[in-house]
Image: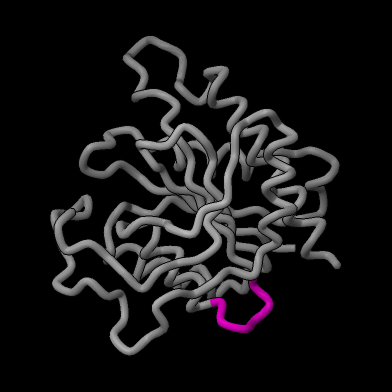
Amino acid sequence: MRVLITGFGPFPGAPFNPSAALAAALARRRRPALAQHEFVAHVFATTFADVDRDLPALFAQNPDIVLMFGLASRTRHLRVETQGRNAVSVLFPDASGYRPQSGLIAAGAPARLRGAAPFVRLLGAMRDSAFPARLSRDAGNYLCNYAYWRALQLAGDGHTVVCFIHIPPVGSRPRRGRRHQSRSPLFSRLVAAAEMLLIALLAASRR
């Protein structure tokens, strides 16, 4: 299977976004359960324009699975997002300073798009890792929700399974001379939980 794993770069209020490091780390994993699959990591600049430009091009590569990660700075657990909302904030600018002019992603489109991933199974897989996880019906109204909704829109009724996971902060950008934050114990636990989720997602998609 071809698996696309995405994260986001920095944005106002988050100079270090661990979702980018997580996407890269997960794409490099080489456990036996992940063998014979193709993994591609992509980090979106946290702007509406970059999502609009990059996401269709990524879907044109016909991924079987799109696993998306984003930072939720006020959460302490993993959130498995079950739906994207046709909503976007007009108050918060993206990393380029742009703010949407409308509170809707797409006028006349459905208010919600529900994902087709096996959410309960994924939740159970991550809980086995001892990292706290919950199901969520609200992906917010910023770039995470925007990208998720657009990905679900692009997937339509096709063969691509889209899943979005909000992750908690795991620290700030490391200071010069220190080990990279991705080697911290908390980040290692996060990667382990994401790996278990990915294995469960692959197993479910083969059926």
Give the residue displayed 83% in from the left and 45% down from the top.
Answer: 33
Q: Position of residue 99 (x, y in %)?
A: 15, 62
Establish if 155 lies above or below 84: below
Q: How many marks?
A: 0
Q: Where is the C terminus found, in terms of image quarters?
A: bottom right
The residue located at (40%, 66%) in the rendering is: 54
Residue 86 lies, with reference to residue 37, above or below; the image says: below
Which percent across, then down, holds residue 189? 62, 26
Q: Is residue 46 magenta?
A: no
Is 67 on the left or on the right of 90, as rendered? Answer: right
Front residue of this view, candidates 177 and 23: 23
Question: Where 190 sits versus 144, above or below?
Answer: above
By what rule are the colours in the image chosen?
one colour
- Please indicate whether residue 137 sits to the left or right of residue 106 in the image: right
* 114 relative to 17 in the view: left or right: right
**What secondary structure do most residues of the magenta stretch adopt?**
loop
Residue 188, image x and y in percent?
60, 25
User: Who's the residue at 56% across and 77% down the image?
Assistant: 155
Quadrant of the image occupied by residue 55: bottom left
Query: Which residue shows up at 79% across the image and 38% down it?
Result: 31
Q: Residue 22, image x and y in percent?
A: 53, 38
Q: Residue 146 or 181: which is nearer the viewer?
A: 146
- Most distant residue in the bottom direction: 108
Which quarter of the figure is the N terminus placed in?
bottom right
- Please report the bounds of the magenta region as a residue range: 155-160
